[in-house]
Image: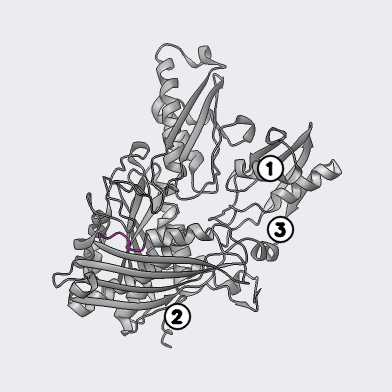
């Protein structure tokens, strides 16, 4: 019915590719016998998940397996699945000696899951005034020979099928399909990048068919308080969609060849799964404060967030603070994924720090030595997909972004402007670094990266042949921070780890169309050849 009533419709079939995470540090672990069990130094994305799986491998009770985090050199979802931690622990247990296992780059690329190639069919409609009327989308993801988290990736693509727009009628179906290819699993963006490429391409096509202004169309349809996501969740607050569009408005109209795309990304796993964090703050000495939590530091700054929250609440010098992630503390955390660490750890630290701050009003740190303060933050009220509930609550928080890709007169990418709503920016340097790094990944995804297979085998395991861009190949980047406070975030903060590359490929595709009038339906896209001078 919605399609029949629509004044304009756009349709497209899109295909995205498989790509490699490209983290700098390959998988590595050290394990050694410890008492009646083993101790493991892990760089995985979830030390408590590591512990549970290692204990099962060794047929040991979990208390006899201790896992300590070593902050890693990048992960982007590629270190969620257990890798060498299990091998190191098993060998150390069997031989009774310390064991180190480290993968070569070739072994790493062959071993961990990749980003899903997804086939998409989109049909999008709007009325004569340029208001979106419906979205119909079909997704088929090549999840490879083993499950990993493929079902969840396709679930997330479906849940974000309408992007950061209010759409009154939605028909979405997503399938994760087993094949004989290398497994695909978690990678930064988690299926939302793919969906956004298809949706935003159709949005531009609708604007052309109806004669609508591309910026104004997006602004008019952007989610606001009271708007509804693809899952039927009504946005209660923290809606920064229009603020991100306003931030790039002048640059959009000033550019000759400009591609615009918007993105939405959840914070937290949600979908009926409890998101929870517990922390402990211990006054070990007057000059030594320890924060124990359960989440992986992999360059995104979760340790920094924890320290800043503690120091903001108590006035303690950050140089006195140590952050530890060790299963012996029993500060149980889940997998560091879904852009949720800032929200969960930040809120839990604030809870504990306020208890310490209350004691500091009556005592100095010397008098509090030996005391510990527990904090927690739990979101256990999201709803399962398809649940028969009066009000759908798929996720507790969302981040919003608008990206603008500007081309020069030869069709080369001159500049990318990224406006991102982070709710509250804890650390401007970390925020900019997160988004700039994401733009690097997103641009590679758009124009150069691929990991082709033939008869179930990778054709190459060299990083350069995977198409990963070098730093010198990047255009000028401008990151604009927007702060529309989230109702549930610490001081209003939202996660920005994944959304940084959600709109990038779509913005590039739309910019190229403005340059040469050719619509791109698959990734990666080739830029026009430079003219000889």
The residue singled out by tag 3 in the image is 103
Across and down, in percent, residue 481 comes to: 32, 51
**Which mark, by number, is residue 526?**
2
The N terminus - image quarter: bottom left
Image spot of residue 385 (x, y percent):
40, 53
* Helix, strand or loop: magenta stretch: loop
Give the structural element (helix, strand or loop) at label 3. Answer: loop
User: Mark 2 or mark 1, which is nearer to you?
Assistant: 1
Residue placed under numbered mark 1 in the picture: 41
Q: CA–CA distance between discs 3 and 2?
A: 33 Å
* Position of residue 143 measured from the top left corner of the image (x, y, whole percent): 55, 66
Label 3, label 1: how far apart the Cα atoms are: 15 Å
Q: Residue at x 47, y 73 (%)?
A: 16
Q: Earlier in the sequence, mark 2 or mark 1?
A: 1
Q: Looking at this view, is 118 or 177 the one in front?
A: 177
User: Of the numbered discs in the image, which one, if any, rests on residue 344?
Assistant: none
Of residues 380 and 485, the one drawn nearer to the viewer in this rendering: 380
State whether residue 33 appears in this view: yes
Tell me which segment is drawn in magenta: 161-166
**Quadrant of the rendered structure where residue 122 is?**
bottom left
């Amino acid at each position: 019915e919605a399609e029949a009533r629509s004044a304009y419709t756009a349709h497209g079939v899109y295909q995205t590719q498989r790509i490699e995470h490209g983290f700098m540090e390959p998988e590595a672990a050290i394990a050694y016998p410890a008492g009646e069990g083993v101790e493991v130094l892990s760089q995985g994305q979830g030390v408590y998940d590591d512990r549970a799986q290692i204990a099962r491998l060794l047929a040991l009770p979990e208390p006899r397996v201790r896992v300590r985090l070593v902050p890693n050199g990048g992960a982007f979802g590629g270190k969620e699945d257990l890798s060498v931690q299990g091998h190191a622990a098993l060998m150390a247990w069997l031989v009774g000696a310390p064991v180190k296992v480290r993968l070569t780059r070739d072994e790493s690329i062959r071993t961990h899951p990749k980003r899903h190639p997804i086939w998409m069919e989109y049909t999008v409609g709007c009325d004569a005034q340029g208001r979106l009327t419906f979205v119909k989308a079909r997704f088929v993801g090549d999840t490879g020979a083993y499950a990993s988290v493929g079902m969840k990736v396709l679930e997330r693509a479906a849940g974000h099928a309408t992007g950061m727009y209010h759409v009154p009628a939605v028909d979405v179906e997503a399938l994760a399909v087993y094949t004989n290819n290398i497994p695909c699993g978690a990678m930064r963006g988690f299926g939302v990048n793919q969906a956004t490429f298809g949706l935003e391409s159709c949005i531009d096509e609708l604007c052309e068919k109806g004669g609508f202004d591309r910026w104004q169309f997006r602004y008019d349809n952007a989610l606001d308080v009271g708007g509804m996501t693809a899952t039927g969740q009504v946005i209660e607050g923290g809606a920064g969609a229009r603020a991100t569009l306003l931030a790039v408005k002048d640059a959009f109209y000033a550019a000759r060849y400009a591609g615009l795309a918007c993105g939405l990304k959840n914070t937290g796993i949600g979908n009926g799964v409890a998101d929870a964090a517990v922390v402990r703050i211990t006054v070990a000495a007057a000059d030594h404060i320890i924060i124990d939590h359960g989440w992986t530091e992999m360059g995104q700054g979760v340790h920094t967030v924890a320290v800043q929250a503690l120091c903001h609440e108590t006035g303690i010098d950050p140089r006195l603070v140590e952050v530890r992630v060790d299963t012996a503390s029993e500060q149980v955390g889940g997998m560091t994924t879904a852009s949720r660490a800032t929200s969960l750890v930040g809120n839990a630290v604030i809870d504990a720090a306020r208890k310490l701050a209350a004691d500091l009003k009556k005592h100095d740190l010397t008098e509090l030595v030996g005391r510990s303060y527990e904090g927690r933050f739990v979101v256990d009220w999201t709803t399962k997909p398809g649940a028969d509930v009066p009000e759908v609550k798929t996720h507790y928080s969302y981040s919003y972004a608008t990206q603008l890709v500007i081309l020069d007169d030869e069709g080369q990418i001159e500049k990318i402007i990224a406006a991102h709503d982070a709710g509250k920016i804890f650390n401007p340097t970390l925020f900019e670094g997160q988004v700039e790094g994401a733009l690097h990944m997103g641009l590679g995804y758009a124009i150069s990266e691929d990991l082709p297979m033939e008869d179930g085998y990778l054709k190459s395991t060299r990083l350069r042949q995977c198409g990963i861009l070098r730093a010198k190949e990047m255009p000028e980047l401008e990151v604009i921070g927007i702060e529309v406070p989230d109702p549930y975030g610490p001081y209003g903060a939202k996660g920005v780890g994944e959304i940084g590359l959600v709109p990038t490929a779509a913005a590039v595709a739309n910019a190229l169309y403005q340059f040469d009038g050719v619509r791109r339906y698959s990734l990666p896209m080739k830029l026009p050849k430079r003219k000889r001078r």
